[in-house]
Image (spheres, grey):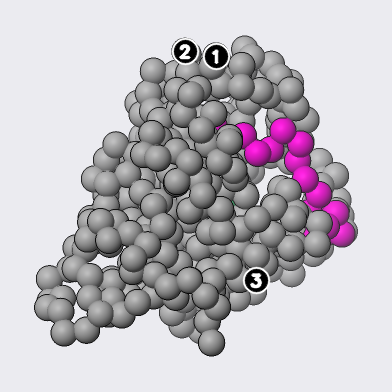
Amino acid sequence: MKIVNVEDARRAARRRLPRIMFDYIDGGAFGEETLRANRRDFGQWTLRPRVLVDVSQRDLTTRFLGGEHALPFMLGPVGFLGLYAGRGEIAAARAAHEAGVPLCLSTFSIASLAELRAATASPLHFQLYVLSDRAIMDELIDQALAAGIETLHLTVDTAITSVRERDVRNGFRALTKVSPGLALRLLAKPGWCLDMLRTGAPRMGAMAHRPEFGTSVLEQAANVSRRIDTRLSWADVDWLRRRWPGRLVLKGILGAEDAVRSREAGADAIIVSNHGGRQLDGAPSTIAVLPEIVEAVDGGIEVLIDSGFRRGADIVKALALGASGVLLGRAYAYGLAAAGEAGVARIIRHLAEEVDITLGLMGLRSVGELKEKGSGVLRRGLRE
Ligand SMILES: Cc1cc2nc3c(=O)[nH]c(=O)nc-3n(C[C@H](O)[C@H](O)[C@H](O)COP(=O)(O)O)c2cc1C
């Protein structure tokens, strides 16, 4: 089947991946209320078309996180890309760089930062989970510095890992090794199995030299998750601010007070995120809280956003409401699972085209013009 939008890629990913893997990507926390709100609330805004404007020359170049990028979005941190397709992190980074946007590598990755750096030349960011053992943190930060990373994303909304009921049902949460039953279920997806066999037994790149974390990716992931620091506080952000010389981004801010506090803590940017509805179920959608956060920080800190972005119009709405850029999560993970590097490239191309056409039909020639006009290009109210 031809993939013409993110939903097509999602369906193709469901066909290609073992169910346990697809559900891990696709699912949200508890009743998945926030997961649904992330999509639904884009409908609270409609776009104002302007006609009879010469839009023959259009420009999607966007400034965010200190760089000029070809598109208004980048690929955010998604764990275990290398389990959705062979060498998945490298495939996604190549597709991102080909399109002129950065990728942020998750702490939970198969490829190490050094491997990814060796395989790609364009901007990479790194996402950090704070572990209770600060020696490991120090080491991760040193790995990032050695790889020439300029932007560090500190994820702040995962002090406790929430419950994703699909993962509980599939036995994903308690998984530390592949049981015979699971092996049989994995074999039901031979294309994925062959891809994995070709690339060899996966391991978490960042922990490869630490035998105490185990040898298989499942053991390593369980051990790292167990060590995520539940006492993480603003004092740690202060510590990290002193330790990290580059750009510091706090990922997972959902309210005006925390946004203002992030600015005081010396962060350079925040990502308004509810972790794609995977953490606090019942939390608001990010598009709903974006305007109050932008107003509260009043230009004092850069504001980006993720969670639920599947359409070009979603991206246009977020930029109009004051986000400097958007991060994709599942949208590109589905593309990767469906068709590797080509699948990620297709999703990026498709979203870029949607943004481009949407802007043109709104009588706007560039992302710069959209940002300048701001929320004036939107109309609040439910779609008919
Ligand atoms: C399968 C999966 C794994 C993720 N892993 C991480 C991670 O390791 N670190 C992190 O900060 N966020 C992680 N996220 C959250 C994403 O960075 C992002 O906040 C979220 O996917 C945005 O929502 P969307 O998928 O609806 O676009 C993950 C999301 C998914 C779907």
- What's the residue type where badge 3 is placed? Arg
Disc number at residue 242? 2
Q: Distance between the residues labelled 3 and 1?
A: 42 Å
Q: Position of residue 375 (x, y in %)?
A: 37, 62
Helix or strand or loop: what does disc 2 sit on? helix
Q: Which comes before the other along the chain, label 3 or label 1?
A: 3
Q: Where is residue 111 in the image (x, y as percent from the top left)?
A: 51, 39
Residue 179 appears left or right of 312: right
Task: Give the residue displayed 19% in from the left and 68% down from the top.
Answer: 365
Q: Quadrant of residue 50?
A: bottom left
Disc 3: CA contacts within 10 A as few (<14), some (14-19) or many (>=20): some
Amino acid type at image mark 2: Arg
User: Which of labels 3 and 1 is toward the front?
Assistant: 1
Q: Is residue 215 left or right of residue 128?
A: right
Q: From the viewer's side, name the closer residue of 41 and 307.
A: 41
Labels 3 and 2 touching (C-beta < 8 A): no
Q: Do the residues labelled 2 and 1 touch (CB within 8 Å)?
A: yes
| 173 in magenta | no
CA gap between label 2 and label 1 equals 5 Å
Q: Earlier in the sequence, mark 3 or mark 2?
A: 3
Q: Which residue is drawn at 22% across and 60% down?
A: 369
User: Magenta span covers which residues?
Assistant: 153-170
Give the structural element (helix, strand or loop) at label 3.
helix
Q: Which of marks 3 and 2 is in front?
A: 2
Residue 310 in view of the camera: yes
Q: Residue 239 carries which label?
A: 1
Instruction: Return the residue at label 3.
Output: 14
Coordinates of residue 13 in the picture (x, y in percent)? 59, 69
